[in-house]
Image (cartoon, helix red, strand yellow):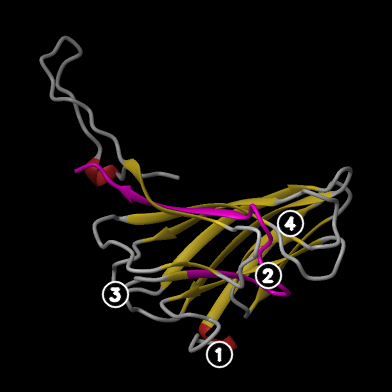
Amino acid sequence: MTVLSLSTKQKYGTLLGPNSAFIPGHYESIATVTVGSGQAASIDFTSIPTTYQHLQVRGMVRQSGAGTGLANLVYRFNADPLTNGDTSSSNYVGQYFYGNGTSQGAGISNRNYCSDHVNGGATTNTFATFVMDIYDYQDTNKYRFFRCLSGCDLNGSGELTMWSGFWKNTSALNQLTFYPDNGNFVQYSHVSLYGIKVAA
């Protein structure tokens, strides 16, 4: 991910110095959720600080629902999906590309999917991993946009998927929720939220 734009690229007048110190954009840990033995219906990040340019989420997830392959990970911005979440399909747009070693494909979705995760009946102790970037999460002049890369090896099968999409809302992002499309997150599912600062 590019965290230094052309407008902020640092320039040096000489290779011999003296020059000011180079300070690149950097990541700061905001919060981490690890699911315990009781499982979890959702993973929530609330009261997200407003002091960053972008956000990044890194996760390793598996669900308890039936099925032997991969399932869809669902995201929600600014609302608890189990109570008052925005469930209108017209407010979410996404597209995806995938490959599994023998086939590949692409498509468009009007669901709020952002990644793959592993079904409860898949190979024991396997988890899908993902990295999700959320851009300009405080900018109220545009929709909330993300991209996400995810993948999983299921002992001889698996899939690599690239998602991108947006929520048709210009509200600043202050809460982020993930939940499985079937069942609960199982023990050891793990999701971390980071803030990205761009060098001035």
Q: In terms of secondary structure, where does tag 4 sit? A: strand
Q: Amino acid at mark 3?
A: Asn
Q: Which mark is residue 98?
A: 4
Q: Which residue is mark 1?
A: 88
The reply, left or right, for residue 42 in relation to residue 139 is right
Residue at image point 65% right, 59% down = 37
Name the spot of residue 25 as percent of width and height, x first: 30, 40
Vertical comparison of 152 with 66: above or below:
above
Residue at image point 31% right, 45% down = 5
Counting residues from the start of the chain, the first of labels 1 and 4 encountered is: 1
Q: Nearer the viewer, mark 1 or mark 4?
A: 1
The reply, left or right, for residue 102 in relation to residue 21 is right
Q: Which residue is mark 2?
A: 184
Asked if residue 195 lies in the magenta stretch, the reply is yes
Q: Which residues are magenta?
A: 177-200
Name the spot of residue 32 as percent of width and height, x first: 46, 53
Q: Nearer the viewer, mark 3 or mark 1?
A: 1
Q: Which residue is mark 3?
A: 141
Counting residues from the start of the chain, the first of labels 3 and 2 encountered is: 3
61 or 93: nearer the eye? 61
Q: Which mark is residue 30?
A: none
